Amino acid sequence: MMTNLFSVFDPSSSIFNLSLNWLSTFLGLLMIPPLFWLIPSRPLLIWNSTLNILHKEFKILLGPMGAPGSTFMFISIFSMIVFNNFMGLFPYIFTSTAHMTLSLALALPLWLSFMIYGWINHTQHMFAHLVPQGTPGILMPFMVCIESISNLIRPGTLAVRLTANMIAGHLLMTLMGNTGPSLSLILATLLIFMQIALLTLESAVAIIQSYVFAVLSTLYSSEVN
């Protein structure tokens, strides 16, 4: 019995006091090795072209001062998030990205590493970044406070944005699906079409949120260089 609406997203299957739901995060590792031994298929070619486009875009965002190969880190983050988002759309598969445990574990180390690197290697630039160019002198103390707060809440906003967008669609699909047995045949048929439309929308959200997370992480990295 559900204690609240969000209890359907709680890890439930366990053995030896270890939650097995989080294993869904690593299911993609089972699919990677066969790709190196098979003839490239159309989905694989589409995925490779997508990664090439992301590599070029992230390289532009990082600018000429970006470290070589740093785009691959953000591409890997995008790949992991979009895979877990899509896995959550299948029945009886745990959605790890709908939990702050995973999203905050991704956002916080990234932000913390950027801040440590920036304040150690580019201290003057980091201080100058707290006061936007053209700010009147009387507003400078307030702008320092505002910019400091906006920097501190960045990992929280990254994590909450991903979690909230993933859990909202799943929650709506769960609520709509629970009303199915009590509906008439006509309304149940209409509900199925609505669920299909919502599933299509969730597929788009899965890609968009992965892209937003990766792009914002890239922008935060470019600010410290």
Image: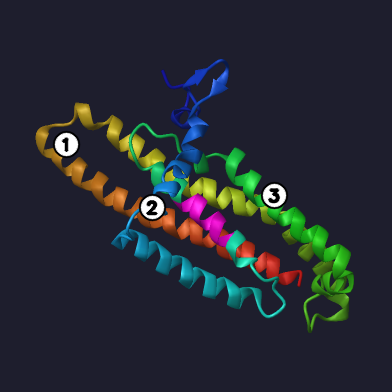
> What amino acid type is highlighted by mark number 1?
Ala
Q: Residue 138 appears at what percent x and percent y?
A: 87, 76
Q: Which residues are magenta?
A: 74-82
Outermost residue, left side = 185
Q: Nearer the viewer, residue 57 or 169?
A: 57
Residue 35 position in % (x across, y down): 39, 53
Q: Nearer the viewer, residue 95 or 161?
A: 95
| Dot 2 or dot 3, earlier in sequence | 2
Residue name at image x 69 percent, y 55 percent? 110
Where residue 145 appears, as percent x and y from the top left, is 82, 63
Q: Name the residue located 36 percent from the left edge and 60 percent from the top edge.
A: 44
Q: Which mark is residue 108?
A: 3
Q: Amino acid at mark 2?
A: Trp
Residue at left 72%, top 71%?
A: 223
Mark on residue 166?
A: none
Q: Is residue 94 left or right of residue 138?
A: left
Q: How is the image coloured?
A: rainbow
Q: From the viewer's perspective, is 100 left or right of 222? A: left
Q: Which residue is mark 1?
A: 188
The amino acid type of the residue labelled 3 equals Leu
